[in-house]
Image (cartoon, helix red, strand yellow):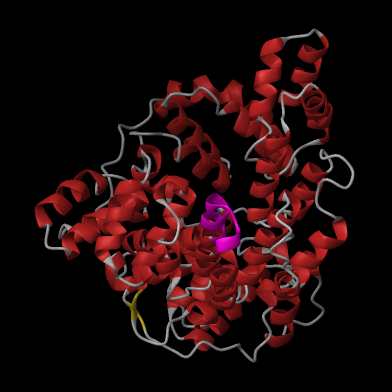
Amino acid sequence: MACDQLQLRLRKQDQAAMREGRTLWFGRKTLPDSCDPVFRQLALQNVISREDIWAALRQALSSSNLPLARYINSFLPPFQGLGEDDLTLAYTRPAQVLEGWNPRDDSTPRRELILFALSQLAARHPQQAADAWSAMAASFPARDQAHGWLQIAWQSTMLHHPNALLWFHNAPESLMDDTLRAARARAALLQENWEELLATINSMGSNESSRAVWRYWRARALSALGRAPEAQALLTPLSQESHYYGLMALEDLGSRFTPPAPPAPLAADETTALQGRFERALRLHRLALNPESQYEWTVANRTLTPRQHLAAATLAQREQWVDRAIYSIERAGDQQDFTLRYPTPFEPQLRQQAERYQLDPAWIYGLVRQESHFFPEARSRTGAMGLMQLMPATARWVAQRVPLKKFRATMTTQVDVNLQLGTHYLRHLLNQLGNPILATAAYNAGPNRVLRWVSGKPQDAAIFIETMPLSETRGYVQHVMFNTTLYAFLLGQPTLTLHQRLGIIQGMTPMRSSEPDPASQP
């Protein structure tokens, strides 16, 4: 939409539009078709320079975004950019491209191709890439040398390579951004190098270093270095925040979770006043028009006060529309109702499956809340379905093992069927991996990936989770285990602290599971 507007402004010779259009050129994962006329005009008028094109191309190649790289490459004159065949070869056979390096060819296209091939080799064989770059780097400009080492270091953190920190140190701090600093911090944490971790967090920009993750690990680093008063000064305010790191901080200070005091009861007119605002969404919900009703609810939630969000959540609860109740109460600020935020629907069916497969009901509730917010018809963009968000291939594989006769994919959105298949699969993962943390991670990322991440020695589970290479899985496990701890309290179970639930990941030899890996199938 921004590019549509810019097209109109450029036709009116709006000079400010040119400056604004240039800012859209950098740091994008995709560039919609509506942006193409804007960028073509800016390139024609040299507002986007040749240097800008190469800088954006390097960004795209560094993130292995080949479609974007090919698009940006089209802005270079014929035979002055990267060849399509060369790009494909560097992506599929990077070692072959590096072996064919000619030190006398120092053209920009050749240097960029070598750096791209280097990053692709590092993603598979970091040490081989480092050895190759050690032999080649001196023939490249200093900035390219540093970029090469940063690519090797960045890719090696995804594989938990022990030399990642060493390779980060081969590049000057001035070329680091906060994404790379976060990767370096996790590499230091993996080695429990607290001095390096603290120094890296301190070098981050204020926006990055103020995130809960780095406030927490800065405190842990300070504590490990014997600076307890400074650690406590960071943990105390963090412990008042309602999320994974807040609960970890609370427990580090020696306290345990207690639910917040409920807000003052709603008066009848507080919900009545919102009835008209949400009537369209409620009527669509009663007609089972799910995407439309959810969208209407989202729009109606805009510009509400915390108290009104509480009233909206209460309206949704009365309609047994659990996912919208959660949506609203999460935006209620200081008007939090613990039972609305952590509901326990489908309890008879869920407890039946938990008992059948000897699983903790709080864990199942924690996982289902994260997967679907208890919306039985939930469908993800990747095709996962139902309360426990099962991929079709996973559902078919588990249905054969249960066994569930005459199973059809459409049955995955049925509450009873979904809970049976999901809990069976969760039990399978727990049997295979022997630890709820690993099983939770495998539910999201597949067991074979998780087995590659496990160290050969015992490891603090909090560090294991924080250093998972996939940010999606990292956040997923943190949310599920935070939810589980709260649900245990709500269900009246003997309450383990979050630290106790995490515990220690026992070492095992990284291996490939002989079992099918249905969670990773498309």
Residue at the limit of the structure toward the right, as seen here: 78
Q: Is residue 463 left or right of residue 89?
A: left
Q: Quadrant of the N terminus?
A: top right
Say which residue appears at 34% left-offset and 79% top-offset: 459
x, y percentage for residue 79?
88, 47
Q: Is residue 261 above or below residue 310?
A: below
Asked if the stretch drawn in magenta spans residue 466, the answer is no
Q: Quadrant of the C terminus?
A: bottom right
Q: Which residues are magenta?
A: 138-148
- In this rendering, the count of numbered labels is 0
Residue at the limit of the structure toward the front, as seen here: 104
Say which residue appears at 62% left-offset and 40% top-offset: 27
Say which residue appears at 74% left-offset and 56% top-offset: 110
Front residue of this view, candidates 23 and 170: 170
Q: Is residue 330 left or right of residue 403?
A: left
Q: Is residue 473 above or below residue 315?
A: below
Say which residue appears at 43% left-offset and 45% top-offset: 174
**Any part of residue 515 in sight:** yes
The rendered magenta stretch, by its main secondary structure, is classed as helix
x, y percentage for residue 355?
48, 80
x, y percentage for residue 513?
61, 88
x, y percentage for residue 466?
41, 64
**Any part of residue 320 in sight:** no
Front residue of this view, candidates 320 and 499: 499
